[in-house]
Amino acid sequence: MGRKKIQITRIVDERNRQVTFMKRKFGLMKKAYELSVLCDCEIALIIFNSSNKLFQYASTDMDKVLLKYTEYNEPHEKREKN
């Protein structure tokens, strides 16, 4: 039996929101690492929390990945908030 689907809405309680953020941040960084290893690709992940603290993960040098991104002029897949 699968997990119950949760409704995605803002968590009102500050403590619960921070705990959820830390758990999901860890999971997201783990998935980014796995994708970089399994598919031999470069990953750059940048996260700012609600108090503007920066968290980042890069499978290689972050500066090199960001430079590559800024110099990329080809059409590419892009996804933004719906």
Image (cartoon, rainbow, N blue to C red):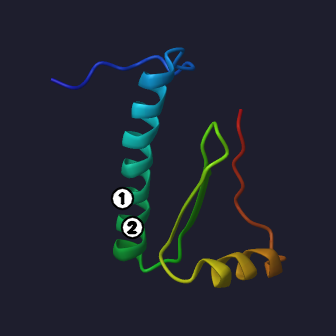
Relative to 32, is 54 on the left or the right? right
Disc assigned to residue 77: none
Residue at image position (46%, 32%) is: 18
Seen from the viewer's position, the closer of residues 69 and 48 is 48
Relative to 69, is 51 on the left or the right? left
Amino acid type, mark 1: Lys
Residue at image position (51%, 19%) is: 11
- The quadrant holding residue 46 is bottom right
> For the C terminus, which image quadrant?
top right
Across and down, in percent, residue 43 comes to 53, 70
Element assignment for label 1: helix
Across and down, in percent, residue 61 comes to 56, 83
Seen from the viewer's position, the closer of residues 77 and 37 is 37
Residue at image position (49%, 77%) is: 41
Residue named by callout 1: 30
Seen from the viewer's position, the closer of residues 82 and 75 is 82
Across and down, in percent, residue 44 comes to 57, 68
Residue named by callout 2: 33
Task: Report if the CB atoms under discs 2 and 1 are less than 8 Å apart.
Answer: yes
> For the N terminus, which image quadrant?
top left
Tag 2: Cα neighbours inside 10 Å, few (<14), some, or many (≥20)? some
Across and down, in percent, residue 67 comes to 74, 81
Count every numbered label the image shows and give the total: 2
Relative to 28, is 4 on the left or the right? left
Element assignment for label 2: helix
Q: Is residue 77 above or below residue 13?
A: below
Amino acid type, mark 2: Tyr
- The quadrant holding residue 19 is top left
